Amino acid sequence: MLAGKELVATVAVKDLAVARKFYEEKLGLKVEDDKGTEAHTYRSAGTRLIVYRSQFAGTNQATALNIMVGADIDKTVKGLRERGVVFEHYDMPGITWDGDVMVSGPMKAAWFKDPDGNILCVMNG
């Protein structure tokens, strides 16, 4: 029934101005649609991310958003680190770490948090 329909990621934040600064200045995204005080929409590579204001922001303890960066993962992590992004390290069985990049066979990933504590991930997949 929903196959072939567009999927859109959403991330809850407490303060849209703080979130906008992070998503634009740290991640390099540009606002496509500014819904004023309640939400911003970003578009990247044909996908959309809605960042919206919610009292429940940052309560998710799992990855909220994966960003597929392909073979550029090491370069992307370095660039984000240079912009002040701090990476998280999680203890999981069967993985190794190459700096801030988790390696598990051919899969590579690096996690970080937005100002509200939402867990974001860049992946090579």
Image (tube, grey):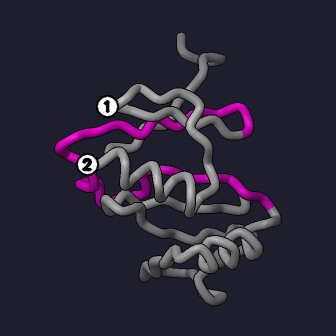
Can I make out residue 102 in this image? Answer: no
Quarter of the image with the C terminus is bottom right
Residue 52 image-quadrant placement: top left
Work out whether 56 lies above or below 74. above
Task: Give the residue type that dot 2 points to.
Answer: Lys
Residue farthest to the top, as pictured: 1
Q: Residue 60 location, x and y as percent?
A: 29, 54
**Left or right of 102 in this view: 76:** right
Residue neighbourhood size for the residue with mark 1, other residues' Cα within 10 Å, grouped as few (<14), some (14–19), many (≥20): some
Q: What x and y, as percent, mark residue 123?
A: 65, 61
Rendered position, 90 above or below 116: below
Give the mark nearer the N terminus: 1 vs 2. Answer: 2
Mark 1: secondary structure? loop
- Determine the CA span between mark 1 and mark 2: 10 Å
In the image, the segment drawn in magenta is 45-70
Residue 29 among those drawn in magenta = no
Residue that mark 1 sits on: 38
Residue type marked 1: Glu
Residue drawn at (66%, 74%), measured in percent from left and top? 77
Residue 47 among those drawn in magenta: yes
Q: Label 2 belongs to which residue?
A: 14
